[in-house]
Image: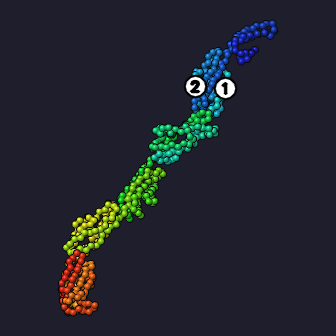
Amino acid sequence: SSGLFTPSIAGAGVHTIKYLYTSTTGSCKDSTTQTIKVWERALADFSVSTSPVCEKQPVTFTNSSTSTEGTITQWRWNFADGTPVQVNTNPLPFTHTFNSYGNFNVKLNVVTNHGCVSADKIVAVTVNPLARPNFSFPAISCLPNANVQFTNQSSVPNGTASTLTYFWDFGDPASGTVNNSTLTDPAHVYINLGPYNVNLEVTTAQGCIHDTTIVLNTIHPQPQASFTTDFIDVCIGSPFLFTSTSNGADGSISQYHWAMGDGSVRTLSSFSYTYADTGTYQVSHYIVNNFGCSSNVATKTVYVNGYPDADAGPDKLMLEGGQVQITPPNNYPMPVTFAWTPATYLDDPTRLDPIARPPDDITYLLTVTTNKGCSDTSSMFIKVLKDPPVPNIFSPNGDGIHDTWVIPYLDSYPGCTVEIVNRYGYLIYRSVGYPTPWDGKVNGIDVPVGTYYYVIDPKNGRKKKAGYVDIIR
């Protein structure tokens, strides 16, 4: 015969088992006894000492199992996350990482040196999700002072993104306190090219922290604007030639911008430009490269200058062999130089009012040039009054030879007078100026043949002439 001893029913302790044998006749009996020791099972227990519990981050488990009989030799952990049962041989705290979030019934049982296995200790562990940090920034930013706007694209699987908090490190420690931000979508100004390691740390409502780092290497240098002009000063009506010498930095130049200082703009790399009026003009120029980066603004000041109003002064009369001073007005508001041409017969052709000694009639041209190179011209005429030789005979007979009393050069004496008297002293002819030589008539009638007497006053600084003239026919 047999029997079944159940320790769990009998309980811990020493139990005596008695076996009684009775023969089939019932008259013979015998018995025997044996003791059985039932060991007390160890008590499995543990706690989770990490808070908060987050996926993909180590969670510390602390064993607190006890045994009243024997020593515990194995701690068998089942994390209910699909990983194999972990058997530890010491009671020290250790970590386990859950690779996903959710609720996990973590189970522990322990084994003593007697081979007794404890009951399972089960603790429900809630593993919270990490945020999925992510962000974007513009594909192109430009120096100087590249203002980079960051767009937060972080999420969390449990749909509670509105409860996320943020801490940004823009990777720019030289910027001081503004290198960090707690805004959702911050912006940061960079003053150098980089690259910059931008870090975003995201904390969930449960306190789980996760971060990501993205390299910002899309900052472009600022293009440099510069230009040349063939002149700084021109005279009104003359053009400037403007030529961009700008550098597109790491890109190619796609736009040229000019402000001419008079309200006009231009968009070419090189061009000729003529201002409509005199004045001082500040020309501004900048470029944009194919990345959309604008350059600094280059400026130059140009000057459009007026022409002087040259005035050579009045024409002059001069007695033959004498001299005359040219007397132009000095009414120039700007620094000017003078040049008379031809320079012959002048004491100083670079003086405004030189003295002239020409032997014959002459026209002088005065060129007035400003300190900006703008010139204007004016002319004046000098009439050389030569000594008129007075003929003492003429024959007004109509033969076409010596029919009039021609006095050379006298017509060039403005205001001269000619008076003729007969032998009796009667005035028979008088002329102021001598544009038409006397034809030997008085009131249209021929005067008699004979000797007549004249007084010629050339004026203009020349002495009177007196003498006789014979009329023959």
Return the x and y of residue 283 as percentages of the image width and height.
41, 56
> Could you say whether the residue bearing mark 2 is in a helix, strand or loop?
strand
Which quarter of the rendered picture does the C terminus lie within?
A: bottom left
Return the x and y of residue 142 as percentages of the image width and height.
47, 47
Q: Residue 262's image quarter?
A: bottom left
Q: Residues within 10 Å of mark 2 (few under 14, many from 20)?
A: few
Return the x and y of residue 185 as percentages of the image width and height.
56, 43
Which quarter of the rendered picture does the N terminus lie within?
A: top right
124 and 473: which one is in front? 473
Residue that numbered label 2 is attached to: 94
140 vs 101, left or right, is: left
289 and 87: which one is in front? 289
421 vs 294, left or right, is: left
Residue 58 showing in the rendered view: yes
Q: What residue appears at the point 22 percent right and 72 percent down from the top-left corner?
A: 358
Spatial separation of the CA atoms under disc 2 and disc 1:
17 Å
> Could you say whether the residue bearing mark 1 is in a helix, strand or loop?
strand
Return the x and y of residue 401 as percentages of the image width and height.
21, 89
Q: What residue appears at the point 61 percent right and 39 percent down from the top-left corner?
A: 161
In this rendering, the answer to whether 48 lies above or below 408 is above
Residue 240 showing in the rendered view: no
Residue that numbered label 1 is attached to: 122
Q: Residue type at mark 2: give it.
A: Phe
40 and 365: which one is in front? 365
